[in-house]
């Protein structure tokens, strides 16, 4: 740097500032900000804890409901599978049928039924059909005992034919 008034070169040095006995104006403001922040932080911590507790209780309930749903669906599926196997009681003792009963959880109801029919077809077991031949019934119209000409149209309208005596 150059001092133009004295025309000499000058040097600038950075040295600590000595304030003397003055109080720091920033420290009071800093203390107030820290106090507000701490109060606000405590409030948010309480809200976070309450939300965390609610979420954990809901998670526990959700897990219980999911387990109940799984148990209910598996019980219903097992019941449906047992109904399918009840239709094929004549295949009990066949090795393929017994193996299918052991590993039935991996198949849908339609696939199980299809596989049971396939086993029945391979073993040559007679199918049980419940068809009874019934005699056909024909619908017969009932006719009146007194014959009316033209189906009784003239009598309905009060017209008497010439050859007819009442």
Image (spheres, helix red, strand yellow):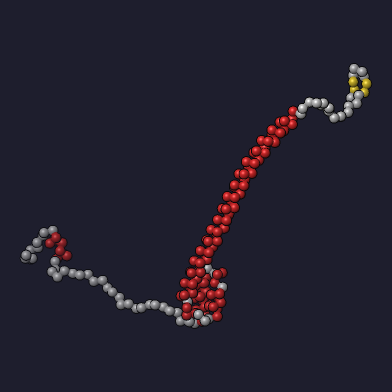
Q: Position of residue 60 (x, y in %)?
A: 57, 56
Query: Which residue is located at x 59 percent, y 47 percent?
Result: 50
Q: Is residue 14 above or below residue 155?
A: above
Q: Is residue 135 above or below residue 46?
A: below
* Image quadrant where one finds the N terminus: top right
Above or below, 128 relative to 16: below
Q: Is residue 2 left or right of residue 52?
A: right
User: Residue 77: where, in percent of width, then height?
Assistant: 50, 67
Name the residue rendered at 92%, 19% in the picture.
7
Q: Nearer the viewer, residue 21 or 38?
A: 21
Look at 69% across and 33% down and name the residue there: 32
The residue furthest top is 5
Image quadrant in which you'd find residue 149: bottom left
Q: Is residue 110 visible?
A: no
In the image, is 27 to the left or to the right of 123?
right
Residue at point 54%, 78% (across, down): 98
Q: Residue furthest front?
A: 21
Count of residue discs: 0
> Which of the two residues, 11 or 94, is positioned nearer the viewer here?
11
Most extreme residue toward the left, as rendered?
Answer: 165
Quarter of the picture containing the C terminus is bottom left
User: Which percent across, then down, holds residue 140?
Assistant: 23, 71
Q: Nearer the viewer, residue 131 or 1?
A: 1
Is residue 89 among what the camera can see? yes
Identify whether 2 is placed above or below 29: above
Q: Residue 40 at what x, y percent from top left?
A: 64, 38
Q: Nearer the viewer, residue 37 or 98?
A: 37
């Amino acid at each position: 740097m150059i001092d133009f008034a004295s025309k000499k070169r000058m040097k600038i040095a950075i040295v600590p500032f000595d304030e003397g006995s003055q109080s720091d104006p920033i420290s009071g403001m800093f203390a107030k900000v820290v106090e507000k922040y701490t109060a606000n932080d405590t409030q948010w911590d309480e809200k976070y804890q309450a939300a965390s507790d609610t979420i954990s209780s809901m998670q526990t309930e959700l897990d219980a409901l999911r387990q109940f749903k799984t148990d209910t669906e598996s019980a219903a599926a097992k019941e449906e599978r047992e109904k399918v196997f009840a239709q094929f009681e004549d295949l009990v003792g066949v090795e393929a049928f017994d193996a299918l009963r052991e590993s039935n959880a991996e198949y849908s109801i339609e696939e199980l039924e299809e596989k049971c029919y396939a086993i029945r077809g391979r073993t040559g077991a007679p199918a049980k059909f419940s068809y009874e031949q019934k005699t056909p019934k024909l619908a017969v119209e009932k006719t009146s005992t007194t014959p009316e000409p033209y189906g009784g149209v003239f009598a309905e309208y009060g017209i008497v034919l010439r050859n007819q005596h009442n």
